[in-house]
Amino acid sequence: MTTITLIPGDGIGPEIMDAALLVLDALKPGLDYEYADAGLAALEKHGELLPQATLDSIARNKVALKSPLTTPVGGGFTSINVTLRKHFDLYANVRPARSFPNTRSRFPTGVDLITVRENTEGVYIGEGQEVSDDGETAVLTSKVTHKGSERIVRYAFELARKTGRRKVTVVHKANILKSTSGLFLKTAREVAGRYADIECNELIVDNTCMQLVMRPEQFDIIVTTNLFGDIISDLCAGLVGGLGLAPGANIGEHAAIFEAVHGSAPDIAGKGIANPCALLLGVGQMLDHLAKPELANRLRDAIIATMEAKDALTPDLGGTGNTMGFARAIAARL
């Protein structure tokens, strides 16, 4: 029996976690659960946002399913998600985006892509931040390494092989950011040379955004640096109906954390109307990671069938259903 760490999170987090577990249990995946605290819930109970016991649980089980967490604004608090990525060296952020039926989307069909984002380097991690004494000048350091670039691009090409995808698009800004983005692009070209069976093309990040809006069907796997990946993956979520349908996986050599990438939505917490699909799709990624692809595919098929039926959709998808009703409808179709 495999044990995974569950982090219920803040705001709507516990509600969508309960919904996800209802569906997951219906799949009978042979998993045990170990609950752990993080975010505001942990701050209230333990006096810290990320207790050592939670880090120990993830290290022990090596797989975690995480609902959204809230990092308090100000007060010197650092992002919990960034802290987790750095602590466990979760270098690959994997964000699929695909078209779903009956969404409020400009692309109800034709989108099926994955953004692979480097997760531990670049300006996003916030190193070297300084503001001059007079408050007139701010400086931020961006560090990109050959090692970090090589392993994320290799991950993207290996993912293409594993999932039967045929093209990897390397996204960069090497025409202007000649040192950092230049090193990333140079390294990506070296890696691409080892994968003759996978098509590789290169796009500047601004052109990528335009092309995604105009013709997203041309993309298969996108691999890019941390900040660009953060922006592009949210853009991709917008193509297919929003963050309520956006899962994410954070993968390292020794641990993996799967999540809904949206926020904790305190404005609707406790109302029972949150869409659980992002976390459920994260469950699908987790099942793939645990070498249970047949269960992952059954889950995704059941989500699609429920959205096609339109009989239990939550308000963000244009329905009048609730969180647990949506989950029960998905479970019934497994």
Image (cartoon, helix red, strand yellow):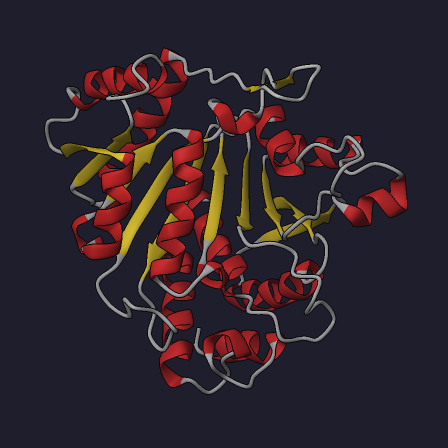
Residue at the (55%, 62%) spot, across then down: 24
Whole-percent x, y for residue 32 in the image: 65, 51
Relative to 321, say whether 261 is above or below: above
Give the number of callouts.
0
Q: Which of 126 and 109 is in front in this view?
A: 126
Question: Residue 117, can we see it?
Answer: yes
Whole-percent x, y for residue 76 in the image: 77, 30
In screen coordinates, is 272 left or right of 280? right
Relative to 233, say whether 280 is above or below: below
Q: Quadrant of residue 138?
A: top right
Whole-percent x, y for residue 329 in the image: 51, 80
Q: Which of 180 and 4 is in front in this view?
A: 180
Quadrant location, the C terminus: bottom left
Q: Which of 71 and 161 is in front in this view?
A: 71
Residue at the (63%, 37%) spot, across then down: 61
In screen coordinates, is 194 left or right of 254? left
Question: Residue 162, can we see it?
Answer: no
Whole-percent x, y for residue 115 in the image: 35, 42
Q: Nearer the viewer, residue 151 or 139?
A: 139
Residue at the (47%, 81%) spot, across then down: 318
Residue at the (72%, 54%) spot, across then down: 10
Q: Quadrant of residue 275?
A: bottom right
